Amino acid sequence: MTAELAPLRDGALLLDDEVAERLAALDQAAVAYLDTTTKPNTRRAYGDDWRTWTRFCAELRIPAGAATLGTLVGFVNWLYSAGNAPSTVDRRLAGVSVTFRDAGRPIDKPVMQAARKAMAAEADNLARANERRGRGKAPAVTVAQLRLMCRACPSDTLAGIRDRALLLIGFAIAARRSELASLHVSDVVEVEEGLIVTVRFGKRGAREVAVPYGSNPLTCPVRAWRAWLAASGLVEGPAFRWIDRHDKLRDRELSGQAVGDVVTRVAGRAGLAGRTAHGLRSGLATEARRAGHDSVSIAAQGGWSPTSRDLFGYMQIVDRWADNAAAGLGL
């Protein structure tokens, strides 16, 4: 069987020119294919990271292709000195690394390790100085707050009916903004028990989510979805679309940013400043945990890995009180 393997010389395959050209063509096709599988938002983020890197290099008058220990550690320090949060620095560094790798010039492992060590040291300095950067985590939306938000959606306008359906579907499937934006009418199927929602473009791949009827008509996602279909007349295409200032439906899907804007706008009307679309996702996790659901069922609903640190953090918000070591001691 191994006799079919091509011979090696100094660790390299011995190939004639024709075979080498065919293999090179396959390599190029593979790179092109993998590029198409990268999500648009990810590509945009990498592009932004690279532009930040080139701006840093221009300031220091060094070539952008010089990914050395000094330049990478200097990049980390430059980002922190500009007031960036640790999570932003981490993402910038990762984006630059991916761009170099995709260009066939991966950054040496010791160089990346040094840059990450510098990043961790700066993060520790911020923690010791009690300096918080970035927006921090958005508060999880509770069921009680979700009711307030639904009441802030006028039931006599198309926009209000859409917004309520968007909020409740988003909460019930613990959706990311991009998942709600990419949802199509055909992805939501009504069954006897409620809805089956197919999330086709989740971060961890596609998933099917069961959404049962709610006990409260105001916050029932099944009833809200029916109301939206009846009011909009939609039978295909994007599920959540733009509505103009005259309350007229437009044939244009909401972007992820627009989905976020809907949530923050409705939250503001409900007197819940600071709530974001991500609060719907984290809210499902915390409220489900509070209702006694285990991590496996919560992870399946929202497309988390069962070992996700984010999911653990959401559940810990509830668990730290439900099973607290200092409780019941007679203090």
Image (cartoon, grey):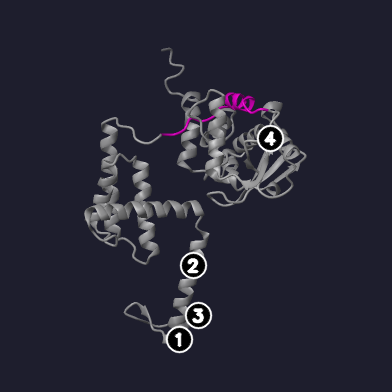
Res 5 visible:
no
Q: Tell me if label 1 and label 3 are in contact, CB under 8 Å.
A: no
Alpha carbons under labels 2 and 3: distance apart = 32 Å
Mark 1 and mark 3 lie on one chain; the one further toward the N terminus is 3
Name the kind of residue labelled 3 in the image: Met
* In this picture, residue 29 sits left or right of residue 75: right
Which of the marked residues, 3 or 4, is nearer the chain's N terminus?
3
Residue that carries the numbered disc 2 in the rendered image: 32
Q: Nearer the viewer, mark 4 or mark 2?
A: 4
> How many residues crowd mark 4 within 10 Å: few (<14), some (14–19), many (20+)?
many
Specify which label sits upstream in the sequence, 1 or 2. Answer: 1
Q: Are marks 3 and 4 in contact (CB under 8 Å)?
A: no
Q: Amino acid at mark 4?
A: Leu
**Circle 1/circle 2 CB separation < 8 Å:** no
Question: Which residue is disc 1 drawn over?
Answer: 18
Q: Any mark on residue 1, and which? A: 3
Q: Magenta span covers which residues?
A: 136-154
Identify the residue position indicated by label 4 in the image.
158
Q: Which circle's residue, 2 or 3, is located before the other in the chain? A: 3
Residue drawn at the location 29% of the way across and 30% of the way down: 130
Spatial CA distance of label 3 from label 4 is: 67 Å
**Can you give x and y, in whole percent of width and height, for residue 174 in the image?**
58, 39
Label 1 secondary element: helix
Q: CA distance from mark 4 to mark 1?
A: 63 Å
Q: Amino acid at mark 2?
A: Ala
Front residue of 131/181: it is 181
Q: Are marks 4 and 2 in contact (CB under 8 Å)?
A: no
Local crowd at mark 2 within 10 Å, few (<14), some, or many (≥20)? few
SS for callout 3: loop
